[in-house]
Amino acid sequence: MSEDEVVLDTGAHRAYLMCHKRLWLEAHRPELVAPTDYSARSFAGRDDVVERVRKACSFWRAVVPTVLPFDERKIATAGAMSALDSGKIGAVYDAVFEEDGIRVRVDVLTAVPGGYEMTFIKSSTKYKPKSHLAPIGFVCHFLIEIKGLRIQRVTLAHVNRDYVVGGDAKFVKRVDITNDVIDVAFYVPHEIKGMRGIIGRDDFPNVSVGKQCKSSQFVCPLYDHCWSDIDGMTIYDIPNLRSKRLLGLESHDILMLEDVPLDALTAKQGAFVRWILGEEININVHAIETAMADIQYPIYFLDFETIDHAVPAWDGVKPHQAVPFQYSVHALHEDGRLTHHAYLHRDGTDPRPALSAWLVNYIGGDGTVVAYNIGFERGVLLGLAEHVPEIGYELRSIAARLWDQLLIFQKHYRDHRFGRSNGLKSVLPVVCPHLSYDDLAVKDGLAAQIAFEKMIASDNADEKADIAFALLAYCDLDTLAMVEIHKVLIAL
Ligand code: SF4
């Protein structure tokens, strides 16, 4: 594919700024690009916000429907722009422009004295210049310099973090970012030249894998491809490795943990590397026994799954607030019996009242409630107590009896095979190798959120039942895993 055949858009621009190899591979080897759950869910969240913003701004009339193919949207945009210029309509939604092999899209274009205002809609609860500005600068440069549009103002519309369903605060906040955008748009001609140069190459640029490939918020869609030959832990697994030390190692082409000179690290990081490479296992049985002496029967092992909507759906909920829709509880009784109870909300109504009622009914007023990383479960329980005050006392009582299994693996039980994480999914395969998430259709919390939304939206009974089964299996395994780990710890 030549540079002439590739359309440059904000996605290509983002790829260019992140990694030149990604830009080339996405243009020439699209079959290697893997969509991630994260991107699927964040796009869905943004679409909901866009819809909500447009509803809130009913004075904006006129639409270029998003469902149209790009070529038709281009034609529709041209027609809508004429109507906008003549004052027949107040705004153009999803305006698409293309020229010179560049394509851009604007969420909302409105006419203002002397030209136009562009509005970009984001699902975040604040303006984030670092991630928001570059693509908007790209669009701005194209519309002003190539299309000749008189852009007078650029606005970012984002979700108001103080908004609550049923409250007085507005859902959207608007920020004038015109000056910031002009600053970054200055670099865009140079960047477009760079993008064309990379795409025109016969082979991909030689870029080493690095920090840019993965973060807690993002995984490069080419991650599996680029990292397929890397076996073992790397410098990116060293905890809290700050830029200066990281750059030092990268500049010496050091990638694998075994090649790291320990004098390039802090004492703590060096100990981590020695511990991993030395294949150390460190179990403080006495400390574990002491910590577990606090646990009282019946022992409830509790796990919630939550959903956070950019546009909250239920009363009293804020944007992006985690609302539980499912839980699993295993109960281990003093006589050795293991019982199980689970709840999964199955429709689009507020899950909290029914979920809370079932939970307090199953977990009585006695016994310890074990969770893995109790900060999350405690927050969910206290949120439920506020929302369902008639059983608030019982919910707070459950929160007060939480006991954190994670602390054992943070303080008293370390095994090099956990790697840098002591999360349940790192610990389980080592401590209880007979249990695994591998065969499950839903394997993590993000996948559970996506599955829940799909189940709610589906009107196919078989599909709903299949998704419900997968969700129940996933959450059940989370609590069964804690039970089995508990048994291992008791037997030490
Ligand atoms: S995985 Fe890393 S090296 Fe590969 S394309 Fe993505 S960012 Fe670039």
Image (spheres, rainbow, N blue to C red):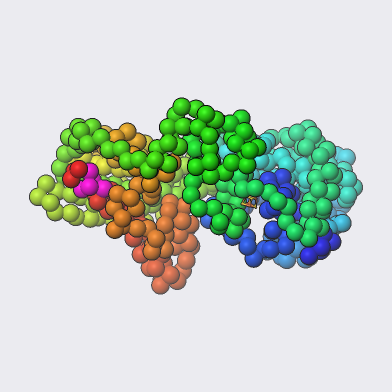
Q: Which residues are magenta?
A: 485-489
Q: Quadrant of the N terminus?
A: bottom right
| Observer-nearest of 440 and 23 | 23
Residue 280 shows in this picture? yes
- Is 47 rendered above or below residue 235? below
Residue 244 on image: x %, y %: 61, 30
Residue sitting at x 75%, y 59%? 203
Residue 379 shows in this picture? no
Question: Position of 124 compared to 296: left or right?
Answer: right
Q: Quadrant of residue 468?
A: bottom left
| Observer-nearest of 341 and 3 | 3
Residue 488 sits inside the magenta stretch: yes
- Is 241 rendered above or below residue 372? above
Q: Quadrant of the C terminus?
A: top left
Residue sitting at x 42%, y 63%? 441
Residue sitting at x 83%, y 38%? 186
- Is 202 rendered above or below residue 246? below
